[in-house]
Image (cartoon, grey):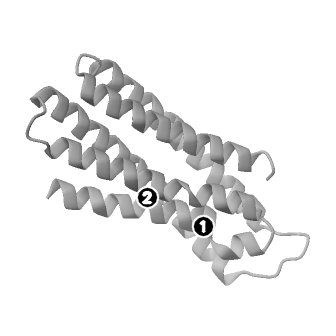
Amino acid sequence: MFASRARGWMTSLGLALAITLLAPNVSNSGVLSENDFRKVEDIKPLFQNLMADLVQTSKRPDISSGDADCIKSTIRELLQISEELSSYEYLITIEKEMTDFGDNNPMRDIVKFAVEKSNTILASERKRLAQLSDQCARSPLSFGKNQQALQFIDTTTNILNSIQVRL
């Protein structure tokens, strides 16, 4: 049950990020460059690989209960991020119905808002994961997995920041 729920939320985060920041119409309307599009597109497989690794590791019969608990907590934190970011999907569904704006493209402000809010969420969740990392420092396996989750958040934040400065 835990694994299927995690897979569902993995898909949600990937879709939310993809829809929010990768919608082809956004790229075609000039809000995001093709390079931005590719960078953000790389977020989804990073998240999917991380979640798959965490779920597989949590199921290993040879890990301690402390490690398993810490890894499951990391998964829960990532699922929380997924849930919070998915709320920005609506912003892009509006965009799909709006196309040719010329030089005065209001979608720029909408995408900028979505990026800013996504970065705010990521910063908040990074703090929570860092606290979890401190709690799991005695369990080497889960500590390493938590560090991978922090690295994912940092990578995602860096990608969004590189886009945000041009909006």
Q: Quadrant of the N terminus?
A: bottom left
Q: Identify which amino acid the numbered label 1 is placed on.
A: Leu
- The residue carrying mark 2 is 13
- The quarter holding residue 3 reads bottom left
Query: In the shown orientation, is residue 69 left or right of residue 7?
Result: left
Instruction: Determine which residue is flagged by label 1.
Output: 91
Which percent across, then down, holds residue 74?
Answer: 31, 38
The residue lying furthest to the front in this view is: 62
**Which of 111/58 is in front?**
58
> What residue sits 29% from the left and 60% below the top?
7
Q: Amino acid at mark 2?
A: Leu
Which is more N-terminal, label 1 or label 2? Answer: 2
- How far from the left and from the top, in percent, is residue 31? 77, 64
Question: Is residue 88 visible to us here?
Answer: no
Residue at (37% x, 45% y) in the render: 78
Residue 61: image location, x then y, percent: 8, 40
**Direction right: furthest residue:** 103
Q: Secondary structure at mark 1?
A: helix
Q: Residue at x 62, y 62 (%)?
A: 21
Whole-number angstrom distance, CA of label 2 to CA of label 1: 15 Å
- How packed mark 1 is, by other alpha carbons closer than 10 Å (few <14, some 14-19, many 20 or more), is some
Viewer-nearest residue: 20 or 113: 20
Q: Which mark is residue 20?
A: none
Looking at the picture, how far across and down is residue 130, in whole percent? 41, 25
